[in-house]
Amino acid sequence: MVKTTRILIVTQLLLFIIGVNKKVIGQDPIFTQFYSNPIYLNPAFVGSRVCPRFALNYRNEWPNISGNFITTAAAYDQKVEGLSGGLGLIVLTDNAAKTVKTTRASVVYAYNQSVTRKFSVNFGIEVTYFQKSLDWNKLTFGDMIDPRRGFVYPTNDLSRGGTSSGIDFSAGVIGYTDKFFFGFATHHLNEPNESLMNSVDVPLPRRYTAHLGASIPLEVNGGRYSKSKDFVSPNIIFTQQGTFQQLNMGLYVKKSSLTGGVWYRNKDAFIITVGLESEYIKVGYSYDVTISKLSLSSGGSHEVSMGFNFACKPKKKSFRIISCPSF
């Protein structure tokens, strides 16, 4: 589920902790540079580049609000000849309002199968260890308030838990040719308990993601395809977690080493992305222009990505690379 509702979730969580009977539902951070770290979007992307790659992501959402969200991630993946697929690692940290911190470390494997000469399928599985913690010192309670001076008194409320951890499982599948790809992923298959109170069970709802994209080469010289990998790439990504749904529609244009993209997140934001890519290094920046009730006063969202592509010499040439965008 996307972060646009996360401040409401955190508020519900804090209210629950101080005794208000509210149901709290967890959710996931989502990057808007979806393909800068593709294995976070769908574990079936692992090894899809064949050669090793390393990705870094940083997202600062609503910087003008004291309760902003900062998310960072690092990922590595590559194809492994002996496993008929790829292996990958992901480490993610998410700091919600400087109060709730989540750390996730994942191991990912994807199996590759050629169906026809032009069509292939990847099946991915992911195993994650997660830890979530709440800083009770950052919470405020009613007995701390002075009518004139504000929060000046110590609270009589006692800490009740504040940490949770567990194992999480996810899976995904991708079908692709050299011109288009489509996929589906389900995260949190086992709906692990992420409650921050010892006596409460709060399952993390499954997150379903469906995505579809194409790579359309730019034409030159009277209709002949350019040999330079310049392309236009339309994409659609649909996400559902619990009762929340989100639709993202976007278009990338790549010309030489420069990539530009425009996305629309349904009833929430317009997203502008720019990226610079060489053979081995890529850098991207995106900005979410908020159009929801939160308005521009939130400061929107800033996201930066960096990727490193390593050279290699695959022993087999039959493994087809997915032609997905870089950002």
Image: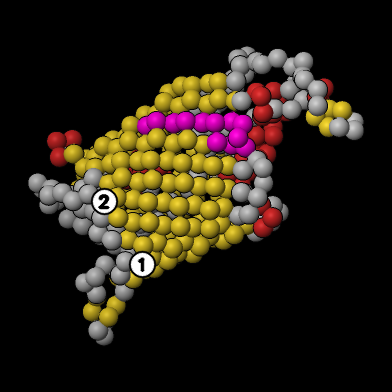
Residue 128, horizontal then vertical, whole percent: 40, 29
Earlier sequence position, callout 2 versus callout 1: 1
Which residue is drawn at the image coordinates 90% and 33% (left, top)?
148
The reply to whether the magenta stretch includes residue 100 is yes
| Quadrant including the N terminus | top right
List the residue tagged with mark 1: 258
In this rendered view, identify the residue nearer to me: 277 or 48: 277
Q: Please identify the dominant SS of the magenta region.
A: strand
Give above or below for 115 relative to 223: above
Q: How many marks?
A: 2
Badge 2 vs badge 1, beta-carbon distance below 8 Å: no
Horizontal side of residue 94 vs 314, given as left or right: right
* Element assignment for label 2: strand
Which residues are the magenta region? Answer: 95-106
In this rendered view, identify the residue nearer to me: 164 or 220: 164
The reply to whether the magenta stretch includes residue 195 is no
Which residue is drawn at the image coordinates 30% and 37% (left, top)?
88
Query: Residue 73 lies in what quarter of the image?
Result: top left
The answer to whether any part of residue 173 appears in the image is: no
Give the label on residue 309, or none.
Answer: 2
